[in-house]
Image: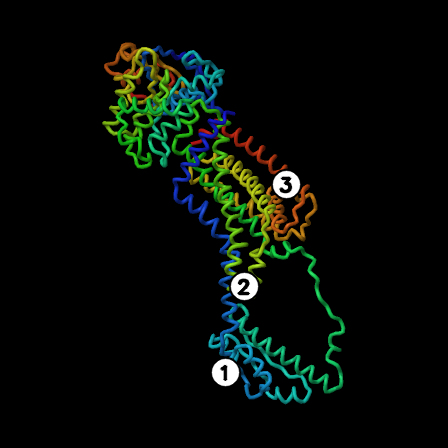
């Protein structure tokens, strides 16, 4: 293998891709912005919306308002709501005149005052998020009123209200700080990195293989003194470069989302938004070790994807045909990412680090949670390196096959 | 310069090149004449080391195509009718890319580009991206790319296909001048007039076999025909390979 030839092949593919504006947008700009948008932009938007809905004074329909005790009416109004008397609360909510309503049965106040069991009905369209938020105001108010009545009755009967809570239950979260801040949706991070290695590398891979065949330049390239192995490796390096650049941009976006933007925007997104940001991994603790693990894992992921892309796209006769071959490849990354969501149920014994691709995603997940250990790291990297070698050997064998090269 | 003996190439049950033999001397333009599917491109691909022969042997500039493929590739240049270039590179970048793959230094490539500019009139093609080229401009760079390393043997495979009259004339004139005393050209085509104009010798290929190998005048005489086209059909019919096929008289 002559490195000057490999470098020349790679440099030409890189230059060619860099001159395609679409590649710059899809490889550098979008990966950089997408994770911060998901990690913080979405919570910023939704948190703001939740907060606005919680604080905006909303008109709520009440059927039988004359039976409503003053204490309950006050509790509802304390939740930023105005009660509007209607004849049919269900019809009013169904017609979207009000986001939620309350049906107070006749004699409600008297029944409660007499120590009996009265009933109220909360009316809401359950599939509507805004309606549910407003129904929540009614539920909170009714619950507060109910607890007050119970306490009052117990006191009247000479019983300490604490009798209702014979067992106090609390939960102690044993997670580390990094695990706590990684969020339930932190699996999205390895998923996006994996997907970007595919998205970032595919244009170069297709152009360098099926594209060359379609243009007729592959034949001209192969009649130069360059060796097939040098062609394969040069093109492979170019594909890795773009797959990796997209993944690294995603990591940069992730770091930005996790630190800089968090400091700037977290105070703005309110409690609801803050919880959502944490759930989506937006408050992760980034350490140098995390970054090294993510970068090395991304390199390996990009190399596996690049070798696979090279093998598959060379079979195609044209750019378009190659695109149809590449599309299903995303499933190879989506399936392990879905499995990653359920990794607590699947199990996280040492064997998972022997499963290619899934192992890198688990390792990335470990990295962002600060739980990565040396043995699984070495197993994962070793398995991936072996897979890269096997796929490159396959791509090289295809580059030597006449029926593949001249399949037109 | 080129020696081909009993060359055979099969694709599954199809014998694409069947026991083909011919010799090309230095200074010659040698024609491979035949219809589509005659085996011309397959023969050239075997000679260019892109395909492996199933039988026979061939040497180019003294190098065996099977045992010394890299030396053969250094000795040849290929111009095909596809005119494939890299759309996002300029003409100069394309030439530098291929020049470096032939092991040339950057200054040597630049000197050679200037030389070729004089021969092929590359003005307007060097610093513009090839994606914006006309067909004629593309063909100039394709030819320049093939001769950049000054190969001893130059293959043209249906090289004028799709060219306008001016570009076609430029390619024909260039290929006629190229052999000089120490180089050779193999001109593969189905266009009789090109062979008549250019070639010192011609091998007529049909269904993978050489049915005749002679000068243009020799072929006409052998077929007792007034022009090459009639001679071609007579020779194919006489070969017996066209049985079951409509071959014009």
Q: CA distance from mark 1 to mark 3?
A: 63 Å
Q: Residues within 10 Å of mark 2 (few under 14, many from 20)?
A: many
Q: CA distance from mark 2 to mark 1?
A: 30 Å
Q: How is this picture coloured?
A: rainbow
Q: Which residue is mark 2?
A: A273
Instruction: Kindly state the secondary structure of the residue where label 1 is placed.
Output: strand
- The chain letter under disc 2 is A
Q: CA distance from mark 2 to mark 3?
A: 35 Å
Instruction: Kindly state the secondary structure of the residue where label 2 is placed.
Output: helix
| Residue B36 rendering spot, x and y as whole percentages | 36, 25
Q: Nearer the viewer, mark 2 or mark 3?
A: 2
- The chain letter under disc 3 is A
Q: Which residue is mark 3?
A: A380
Which of disc 3 and disc 1 is earlier in sequence? Answer: 1
| Residue A1 rendering spot, x and y as whole percentages | 52, 25
Q: How many marks?
A: 3
Specify the quadrant that holds the C terminus of chain A. top left
A389 and A175: which one is in front? A175
**Above or below, A84 relative to A394:** below
| Residue B5 rendering spot, x and y as whole percentages | 43, 12
Q: On the image, which quarter does residue B157 sit in?
A: top left
**Above or below, B145 relative to A160:** above
The image's mark for residue A84 is 1
Which of disc 1 and disc 2 is earlier in sequence? Answer: 1
Task: Determine whether label 2 and label 1 are within 8 Å by CB.
Answer: no
């Amino acid at each position: 293998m002559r490195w000057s030839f490999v470098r020349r092949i790679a440099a030409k593919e890189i230059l060619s891709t860099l001159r395609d504006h679409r590649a710059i947008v899809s490889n550098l700009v979008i990966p950089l912005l997408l994770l911060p948008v998901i990690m913080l932009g979405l919570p910023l938007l939704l948190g703001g919306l939740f907060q606005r809905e919680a604080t905006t004074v909303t008109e709520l329909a009440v059927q039988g308002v004359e039976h409503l005790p003053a204490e309950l009416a006050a509790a509802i109004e304390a939740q930023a709501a105005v009660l509007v008397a209607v004849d049919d609360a269900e019809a009013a909510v169904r017609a979207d005149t009000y986001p939620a309503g309350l049906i107070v049965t006749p004699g409600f106040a008297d029944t409660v005052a007499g120590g009996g069991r009265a009933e109220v009905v909360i009316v809401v369209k359950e599939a509507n998020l805004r309606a549910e938020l407003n129904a929540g105001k009614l539920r909170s108010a009714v619950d507060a009123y109910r607890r007050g009545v119970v306490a009052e009755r117990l006191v009247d009967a000479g019983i300490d209200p604490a009798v209702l809570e014979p067992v106090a239950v609390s939960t102690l979260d044993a997670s580390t700080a990094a695990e706590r801040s990684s969020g339930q949706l932190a699996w999205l991070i390895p998923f996006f990195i994996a997907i970007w290695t595919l998205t970032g590398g595919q244009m170069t891979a297709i152009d360098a293989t099926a594209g060359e065949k379609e243009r007729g330049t592959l034949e001209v390239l192969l009649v130069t003194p360059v060796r097939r192995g040098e062609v394969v490796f040069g093109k492979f390096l170019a594909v890795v470069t773009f797959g990796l650049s997209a993944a690294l941009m995603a990591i940069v976006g992730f770091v930005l989302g996790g630190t800089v933007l968090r400091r700037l925007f977290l105070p703005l997104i309110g409690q609801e938004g803050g919880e959502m940001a944490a759930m989506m991994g937006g408050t992760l603790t980034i350490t140098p070790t995390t970054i090294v693990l993510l970068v090395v894992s991304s390199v390996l992921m990009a190399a596996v994807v690049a070798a696979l892309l090279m093998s598959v796209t060379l079979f195609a006769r044209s750019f378009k045909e190659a695109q149809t071959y590449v599309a299903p490849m995303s499933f190879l990354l989506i399936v392990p990412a879905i499995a990653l969501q359920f990794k607590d149920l699947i199990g996280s014994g040492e064997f998972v680090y022997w499963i290619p691709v899934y192992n890198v995603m688990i390792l990335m997940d470990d990295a962002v949670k600060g739980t990565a250990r040396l043995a699984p790291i070495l197993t994962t990297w070793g398995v991936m390196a072996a897979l890269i070698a096997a796929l490159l050997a396959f791509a090289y064998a295809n580059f030597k096959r006449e029926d593949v090269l001249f399949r037109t | 310069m080129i020696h081909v003996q009993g060359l055979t190439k099969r694709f599954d049950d199809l014998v694409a090149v069947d026991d083909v033999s011919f010799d090309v001397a230095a200074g010659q333009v040698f024609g491979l004449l035949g219809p589509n599917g005659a085996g011309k491109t397959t023969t050239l691909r075997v000679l260019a080391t892109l395909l492996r022969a199933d039988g026979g042997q061939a040497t180019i500039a003294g190098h065996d195509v099977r045992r010394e493929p890299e030396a053969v590739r250094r000795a040849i240049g290929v111009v095909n009718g596809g005119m494939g270039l890299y759309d996002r590179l300029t003409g100069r970048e394309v030439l530098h890319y291929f020049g470096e793959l032939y092991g040339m230094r950057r200054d040597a490539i630049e000197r050679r580009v200037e030389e070729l500019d004089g021969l092929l009139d590359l003005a307007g093609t060097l610093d513009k991206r090839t994606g914006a080229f006309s067909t004629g401009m593309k063909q100039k760079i394709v030819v320049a790319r093939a001769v950049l390393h000054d190969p001893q043997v130059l293959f043209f495979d249906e090289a004028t296909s799709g060219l306008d009259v001016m570009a076609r004339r430029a390619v024909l004139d260039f290929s006629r001048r190229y052999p000089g005393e120490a180089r050779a050209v193999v001109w593969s085509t189905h266009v009789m007039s090109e062979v008549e104009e250019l070639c010192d010798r011609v091998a007529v290929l049909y269904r993978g076999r050489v049915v005749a190998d002679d000068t243009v005048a020799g072929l006409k005489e052998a077929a007792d025909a007034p022009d090459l086209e009639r001679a071609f059909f007579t020779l194919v019919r006489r070969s017996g390979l066209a049985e079951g096929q409509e071959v014009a008289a």
